Image: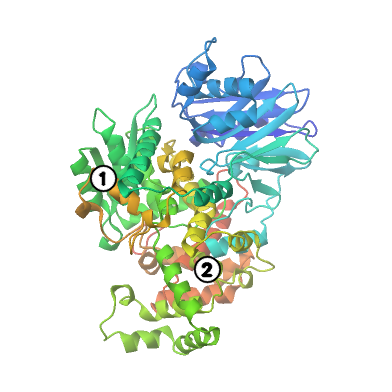
Amino acid sequence: MCGIAGFWQNKQSDEPPVELLNRMATVLAHRGPDDSGAFFDPSTGVGLAFRRLSIIDLSSEGHQPMRSASGRYTIIFNGEVYNFEEIRSELGAQTWRGHSDTEVMLATIERWGLHAAVQRFIGMFAFALWDREERSLHLVRDRMGIKPLYYGRINGSFVFASELKAIRLFPGFQDRIDRDVLALYLRLAWVPTPHSIYEGIHQLRPGHILTLHSHYEGPVFTQFWSAADVARSGLEAQIKGPDSEVIEQLHEILLSAVRLRMIADVPLGAFLSGGIDSSTVVALMQSQSSRPVKTFTIGFHEDLYNEATHARAIASHLGTDHTELYVTPKEACDVIPLLPAMYDEPFADPSQIPTHLVSKLARQHVTVSLSGDGGDELFGGYDRYLFIKSLWRFLKRVPRPFARGMARTIRSASPAAIDRVLGALPMPRELRTAPGHKLHKLADFLVQQDPASIFLYTLSQWPEPSSIVIGASESQTFAQAIADLKWLPTAQDMAMFADMTNYLPDDVLTKVDRASMAVGLEARVPLLDHRVVELAWKLPLHHKIRGTKGKWILRQILYRYVPPELVDRPKMGFGVPIGPWLRGPLREWSEDLLSPASLKRSGFFEVGPIRQKWEEQLSGGRNWQYLLWNALMFQAWIAAGASAPQPETAPITLAGSAPN
């Protein structure tokens, strides 16, 4: 795992190019604390910068930028190609400098060409390849978007990097925030590909190659792997046969995916939450390890958010070398000032806090940690998949005017009034807390027109963000991407595909990458091996969701290693009690960022709607924790200095406590 950056200059800058490259690499040192390197071709103005986290071949033979044996190609590479030994054998006898996967990648590209080479790679990767013979620069991002890669033009030069902080260092960069994208962020809590928060800077789409033949020409994009093609072909060739055979087929591929990701020349472990996904990964690791696997868990003292006891039970049953850390609200809140620099752009998934804490814990013991991310999106694990199916089945049966009338009736009473009426009645577990708020949310769903709009609303924090962001017209790229999924046969297939291609890379994987890389830890995601993804789309839906349980087939595999009673429980997620914290230890910090003066000073949000939500949150009348967290993370990012490479921020003073 590493950090990469570079450029194709249109003219010589005042700063010597190699010094600029070294500065761009230095701000990525957290991604690669072990080594650094730079390459500059004065005849073209192409420069490549690199920071290395040594995982495979710890010797100097793994140093980058690395040149191919013929001298034609030079590469900087972030990620891992796990099947490099197999490819190396296929390449046959030749002289090797070392045993790194990077050297094998270059040899593969020389033998078969770039497009054919990446088809052979099993792994996660974002790399830049300079072809001296054809005088072309290629940027490549892995199939699932596990590794980040940003690019754009600054004063006529083409610039790219793993993180925005390196791009911001390029002379002439202007930190113009794209208000249309900001509105999209406010809706989702994350910035979706191909956007970035800055005008003119983009993310390379997963499974794509960007090719540049000169610094002044536009890039050419080619796609070497298509999630849509995988889903279409999988749905057309659904696996048939007894459950036992289908389960075993997936089991074998998962064993292979996990085995490949256990290859490392440094200590290795795994995150363990106690849920289905991470427990499956750890079980498959332990079944293929001769020693106890090191596992890591973060716990909270608030029972509603604490999965540590479940993780401990799984670890004990599997016999792992388990480490857990219980975190106080103060320790969790101390992470918050680090987030603007860690993420470079607004990012508001509250699980970013425990993800960083568990990464920091793991890094004290290992350099590589496997994660269970991807299971929900591939195998139907989110509760919203059942909700979308049930709601759409209902809405199809009732006339539109009736559904709209139900919504109006619910909205005619305030959430507080509904709470008073229903508070004394026996209620389903899901409605016992804040029933008025939840019924108002249901009213919003009743007016949706189709599964795509229902799904979009399930992801929406601020449903009309253009009315909140001053001067914005929300970019429709995300909404259009969802609307274009009518070719999928069911609402659940549509939602899973949309999550796999949007929420997964832009929220989940972004969160894991930045949180782990901030402490120099490599996170690997075996469930997102493209062979697993391709098989998942060949599985009939009833192998994923059966009755009211998602991830049915993953559960059957896990049951081979762990008793069902240890893992069969309601899905909890990896969250933190943001709502109570906003009213408690984070109240002063939040009030400062959301004060009318602060909101007017930043100049991006309408003051009235933000203040209304904040006051209702404080009164306890409504729970707007996620909407407010989106606004707070943007305000904190601005306050920290959105254009500074490494903004320094003061620690948060918790209510009732003194500064550190």
Q: Which residue is mark 1?
A: 324
Left or right? Give the position of 120 relative to 46. Answer: left
Q: Residues within 10 Å of mark 2 (few under 14, many from 20)?
A: many
Left or right? Give the position of 120 relative to 281. Answer: right
| C-alpha gap between disc 1 and disc 2 | 41 Å
| Above or below 609: residue 102 | above
**Any mark on residue 451, and which?**
2
Can the viewer see residue 649? no
| Above or below 278: residue 7 | above
Q: Nearer the viewer, residue 250 or 79?
A: 250
Of callouts 1 and 2, which one flags the residue occurring earlier in the amino acid sequence?
Answer: 1
The kind of residue on which mark 1 rests is: Glu
Rendered location of residue 334, percent (x, y): 39, 52
The scheme the figure's colours follow is rainbow
Rendered location of residue 542, percent (x, y): 38, 57
Q: Residues within 10 Å of mark 1 (few under 14, many from 20)?
A: some
| Above or below 228: residue 181 | below
**Residue 95: quadrant of the picture:** top right
